[in-house]
Image (spheres, rainbow, N blue to C red):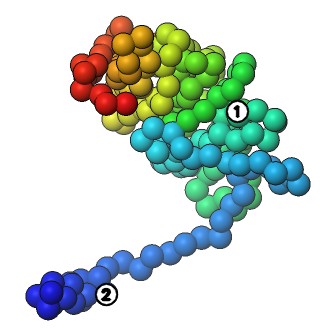
Amino acid sequence: MKYLLALVFAGLPMVAGAAEWRFETPVELTAKDTAAHFHHHDGAGRRHVAAGKQEVAVVWEDDQSGMPLVYLAVLPYGADTHAARYRLSLGGEAYAPAVVAAGAGRWIAAWEQDETVVARVIDGDGPGPVTPLAEKGARQVTLAHDGEGRLAAAWAKSTPAGQLLEAASLRVEGRRIVLAETPIRVAPLQEHAY
């Protein structure tokens, strides 16, 4: 135990020499109202914040309209009050969103919508069209973008035999998301205990 403490205290000079942390005043991204509702950040991979070169995007789900819907806010760096806010989901209940920066002021968001997963591009003109990524039974989508144009999504999918994982490469064509390939199973069904 005393050796463990010695190691911890030996590292303190490195921590003391680290760059100082600086926190700005928080900016409210959601509308103020008096109704009780919850803002959820519970999507797969916890991909709720994405940083671009000049701004940051935050995606969440809340029930301010009486049902769970997905929203996105884009805030320029250094701004203290103004954020562009968009309702992303259409139709019925929507859950578990994710967002990634796609360069040139564009964002890609994906979420659960009406028992499947969907995605759309958001740019300076607002949200583009919604694109279904999977058939019914899909949920818990997450995204990855490498900053050089490669984009992928992965999600869980229920089948009569149990749950499996699927993934697909995506591409952006104008303001639309397109499946670049047919979704594939990334792990055999028997490997998932849930």
Up-down relation of residue 146 to residue 1 (above or below): above
How far apart marks 2 and 1 lie (CA) works out to 44 Å
Q: Which mark is residue 53?
A: none
In percent of width and height, residue 102 lies at 46, 33
In percent of width and height, residue 27 lies at 68, 61
The residue sitting at 50% across, 16% down in the picture is: 137
Identify the secondary structure beneath mark 1: strand
Kind of residue sitting beneath label 1? Leu
The residue sitting at 45% across, 76% down in the picture is: 21
Q: Left or right: 21 with respect to 6? A: right
Mark 1 surroundings: few (<14), some (14-19) or many (≥20) residues within 10 A: many
| Quadrant of image for the C terminus | top left
Residue at the left extreme, as displayed = 3
Towards the viewer: 70 or 106: 70
Label 2: which residue? 16
Towards the viewer: 155 or 163: 163
| Quadrant of image for the N terminus | bottom left
Mark 2 surroundings: few (<14), some (14-19) or many (≥20) residues within 10 A: few
Kind of residue sitting beneath label 2? Ala
Identify the secondary structure beneath mark 2: helix
Label 1: which residue? 69
Towards the viewer: 9 or 144: 9
The residue sitting at 48% across, 30% down in the picture is: 140
Quadrant in which residue 4 is drawn? bottom left
In percent of width and height, residue 20 lies at 41, 80
In percent of width and height, residue 15 lies at 29, 82
Quadrant in which residue 126 is drawn? top right
The residue sitting at 19% across, 88% down in the picture is: 5
Of circles 2 and 1, which is in front? 1
Counting every numbered tag in the picture gives: 2
